Amino acid sequence: IEYLAVFFCGIMGGLSAIKRGYDLFSIVLVAWLTALGGGILRDVLLGDLPPVGISDRGFVLTALAAGLVAAFAHPEVERMYWTMIVVDALALGLFAVNGTAKSLSMHGSGTTAVFMGMFTALGGGLIRDTLLNEVPMVIRNRHWYAVPTAVGCVLTVVVFRATQRGYIGLHAEMALDVGIVALVVVMRVLSVAFNITLPGAVERDRFDFHEQGRYLTRPVIHPRGHR
């Protein structure tokens, strides 16, 4: 499942480069950064060097292969809309749980682990969009994207702490982690299918700020000798 997530994340990165008309090297590079950029960012912040994005041969080759597949099969891949949505959601959930768990296993705090999980899941897309000079997906996508990721990270911390305290066993932890990934996928897919979005800023037709008006009506008195 982990290799599958890396592969499809790489394909999505490659497709983004193809839409901008870049050459084969750029397509493969963007695919690699999209698939493994979040893990690289996480490992650098955790001090786990060299990062898995350059040290794990299997992950690196999988990401590079995804770029090549995208370069040659992009017309067919672009038609698999819902498949890509589901697989992208699967990658979000898996990377969120994986990144959070790795931070916790290195004795990071719960807050740190949540951020590391989100960096792992969202960092690759952020790097991709920055390179391609686009508004990052985490901001421009109005459907639930970062929200399911954050939920998955927080729940992973809860499950990990419960295991540490002996409330649940190792097998139960594994089952709950799989359930967390499934929850992230369901939340993401439902938000796209039913156009569920978070509310924006509160719309107001008028405002009332008497204090500001009272202070602004006072005369401004300058010190003697100054104008």
Image (tube, rainbow, N blue to C red):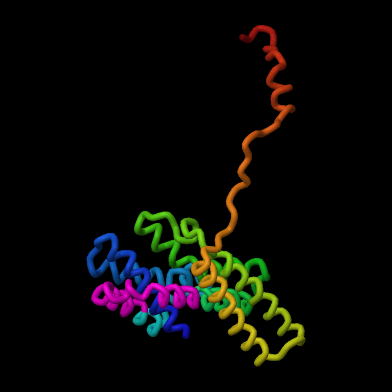
Residue 145 visible? The answer is no
Task: Looking at the picture, tell me which residue is in the foreground, 147 or 45.
Answer: 147
Indicate the position of residue 213 as horizontal and vertical percent values: 70, 23
Name the image quarter holding the C terminus. Answer: top right
- Count of numbered marks: 0
Magenta segment includes 74: yes
Task: Looking at the picture, tell me which residue is in the foreground, 225 or 194.
Answer: 194
Q: Which residues are magenta?
A: 63-91
Magenta segment includes 97: no
Name the quadrant containing residue 169. bottom right
Query: Outermost residue, front direction?
Result: 194
Identified at 32% across, 71% down, the residue is 78
Name the quadrant containing residue 197. bottom right
Q: Say above or below: 178 vs 18.
A: below
Indicate the position of residue 138 as horizontal and vertical percent values: 49, 61
Q: Say above or below: 215 vs 69.
A: above
Residue 215 visible? The answer is yes
40 displayed left or right of 166: left
Type of secondary structure dominating the magenta stretch = helix
Name the quadrant containing residue 22. bottom left
Indicate the position of residue 36 as horizontal and vertical percent values: 43, 73
Indicate the position of residue 26 as horizontal and vertical percent values: 28, 66
Q: Say above or below: 196 vs 10.
A: above
Identified at 39% across, 77% down, the residue is 8
Task: Looking at the picture, tell me which residue is in the foreground, 57 or 78.
Answer: 78
Identified at 32% across, 68% down, the residue is 15
Q: Say above or below: 133 vs 43.
A: above
